[in-house]
Amino acid sequence: MGVKRNGVRHKQVGEYHYAVFALPEGDHYRWTVTRSDMSERTTDHFGRQLTTGTAKDEAEAWLVGKSWLNKYLLRTYLEGEFPGQTVSEFSHPERGGQGFRIHDGVPLVALVSDEFLEDTDTEKIMEILRRWNLAQAMRTMGKDTVVFVTTEGLRSEERRRL
């Protein structure tokens, strides 16, 4: 669950830095995700963060922040696999999870389950996506299919209105 120094739990994954720390009141925890080119002093500077939030306890803060970190890592993977293409995100409350749309002439869509984002080890997510070959699956399935990413692997389904 990361390294704890001076009451702040840290984790570095690729170019991202992730931290969880108690708020001064002590009854809530803040989680934050920043770029690693920022110093640790800037992790609590809201204007330079990628995302931040609060939780009722340290475990919840770690889980929610980890899910956000995994979203950034997944986006980084897709941007690398589809260079020069626009990668956009959307939430899908009916099915749960985070959607990613690649605007590659024809839109390609992947829907990533909340469980995958919460349960997948941040150090292994890129390796898993490469091993499962998500980008190739999206290309192969095309515009009429959604590729679902779950803890069990990839599956596809005919696209409706995603």
Image: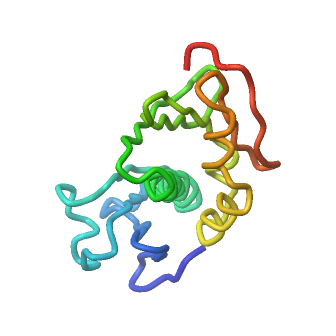
From the top left corner, tell me how far across and down residue 78 is, in percent. 50, 51
Quarter placement of the C terminus: top right
Q: Camera-side residue: 112 or 31?
A: 112
* Residue drawn at point x = 48 percent, y = 27 percent: 106
Instruction: Answer left or right for 153 relative to 73.
Output: right
* Residue drawn at point x = 53 percent, y = 62 percent: 58
In the figure, residue 60 lies in which quadrant? Answer: bottom right
Question: According to the image, what is the colour scheme of the structure?
Answer: rainbow
From the top left corner, tell me how far across and down residue 27 is, in percent. 42, 56
> Residue lying furthest bottom in this view?
5
> Residue lying furthest right in this view?
152
In the figure, residue 49 lies in which quadrant? Answer: bottom left
> Residue lying furthest top in this view?
161
Q: Camera-side residue: 19 or 148?
A: 148
Q: Camera-side residue: 56 or 162?
A: 162
- Disc tally is 0
Q: Is residue 154 visible?
A: yes
In the figure, residue 2 lies in which quadrant? Answer: bottom right
Q: Is residue 61 visible?
A: no
From the top left corner, tell me how far across and down residue 72 is, in percent. 45, 55
Instruction: Answer left or right for 112 relative to 90.
Output: right
- Indicate whether 47 appears above or below 143: below
From the top left corner, tell me how far across and down residue 70 is, in percent. 54, 56
- Indicate whether 115 appears above or below 70: above
* Residue drawn at point x = 49 percent, y = 29 percent: 107
* Residue drawn at point x = 56 percent, y = 32 percent: 109
Quarter placement of the N terminus: bottom right
